[in-house]
Image (cartoon, rainbow, N blue to C red):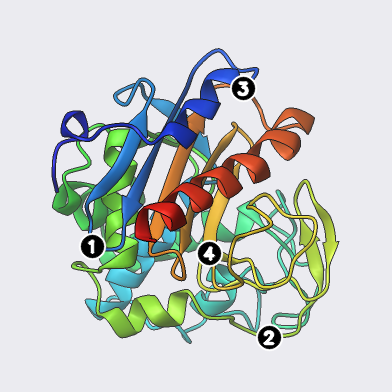
């Protein structure tokens, strides 16, 4: 991957300068792994909050491909599997290790589910999950500034410079078989309703394996121009990562202000500006 410094920033990325946050950085990565632009303090380490989940999910999929776990083996509450935990269909509550619904029947977004997932992988591999995440994802991708400092659901810390590497990996996998990534970015347990944190009830509330799928959700944190195939995640620390296969690009934005009305207002027009600039460059 070319160096961030070698890339002239896209004009749309400068919009982050107007966001009401102490610090922000962003970058756009094309499907071929090249950088379309970057802006802000690229080496600043930001708490990721739930943008940690796609990283945890990727490590879980590495464990699957290595044969340490199977997606349909039991994990979590009775009747739940690794696949259920990844797809937020285990029935576990948001932040409590208790089941509130039978597995596979509701889309219950769950930090607890990802914590159970991390424990399950640690037990299966004999390696503490933070170490496994580093060995399976961070180190191979050269994400030297990324760490997991607690919960596999929400305690990752990283930089834009590191996450552009992960965004490139999501578009052109090297650590996983492309078929595994295709499955992770396709709807798992279609048709389930649920709440998208910060955006209310969605019907359907589609997810893949650790990655949210936009489909026709409204309201949403991506843009009006984002394709239904867009997938990614946002975090309550004011962070997001999306990949839009139709646009042939991914975008990472990290801030140090908690998600709130400012983000609901700022993020969609920012994404639309990024997509418009990408489309104009292709024209």
- Dot 3 and dot 1 residues touching (CB under 8 Å): no
The residue beneath circle 1 is: 32
Q: CA distance from mark 1 to mark 4?
A: 17 Å
Camera-side residue of 203 and 108? 203
Q: CA distance from mark 3 to mark 4?
A: 23 Å
Expressed as whole percent of the image width and height from the top left, the position of residue 203 reads 83, 74
- Dot 1 and dot 4 residues touching (CB under 8 Å): no
Please report whichever mark, 2 or 3, sits nearer to the chain's N-terminal start: 3
Few, some or many residues within 10 Å of mark 2 (<14, 14–19, 20+) = some
Q: In terms of secondary structure, where does tag 4 sit?
A: strand
Q: Nearer the viewer, mark 2 or mark 3?
A: 3
Left or right for 87, reference 130: right
Q: CA distance from mark 3 to mark 1?
A: 29 Å
Residue 231: numbered disc: 4
Q: In terms of secondary structure, where does tag 2 sit?
A: loop
- Dot 2 and dot 1 residues touching (CB under 8 Å): no
Left or right for 217, reference 184: right
The residue beneath circle 3 is: 19
The residue beneath circle 2 is: 190
Left or right for 84, reference 8: right
């Amino acid at each position: 991957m070319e160096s961030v410094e070698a890339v002239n920033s896209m004009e749309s990325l400068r919009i982050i300068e107007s966001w009401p946050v102490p610090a922000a950085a962003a970058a756009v990565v094309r499907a071929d792994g090249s950088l379309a632009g970057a802006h802000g303090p690229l080496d600043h380490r930001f708490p990721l909050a739930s943008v940690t989940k796609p990283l945890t999910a990727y490590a879980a999929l590495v464990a699957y491909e290595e044969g340490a776990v199977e997606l349909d083996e039991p994990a979590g509450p009775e009747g739940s599997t690794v696949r259920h935990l990844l797809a937020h269909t285990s029935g576990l509550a948001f932040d409590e290790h208790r089941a509130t619904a039978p597995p596979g029947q509701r889309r219950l977004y769950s930090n607890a589910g990802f914590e159970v997932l991390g424990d399950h992988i640690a037990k299966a591999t004999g390696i503490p999950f933070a170490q496994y995440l580093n060995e399976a994802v961070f180190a191979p991708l050269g994400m030297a500034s990324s760490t997991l400092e607690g919960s596999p659901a929400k305690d990752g810390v990283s930089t834009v410079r590191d996450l552009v590497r992960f965004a490139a990996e999501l578009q052109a996998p090297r650590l996983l078989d492309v078929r595994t990534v295709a499955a992770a970015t396709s709807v798992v347990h279609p048709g389930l309703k649920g709440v998208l944190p910060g955006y209310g009830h969605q019907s359907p509330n589609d997810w893949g394996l650790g990655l949210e799928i936009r489909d026709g959700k409204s309201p949403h944190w991506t843009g009006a121009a984002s394709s239904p195939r867009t997938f990614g995640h946002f975090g309550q620390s004011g962070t997001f990562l999306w990949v839009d296969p139709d646009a042939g690009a991914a975008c990472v934005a990290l801030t140090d202000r908690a998600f709130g009305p400012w983000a609901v207002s700022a993020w969609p027009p920012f994404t639309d500006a990024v997509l418009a600039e990408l489309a104009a460059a292709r024209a």
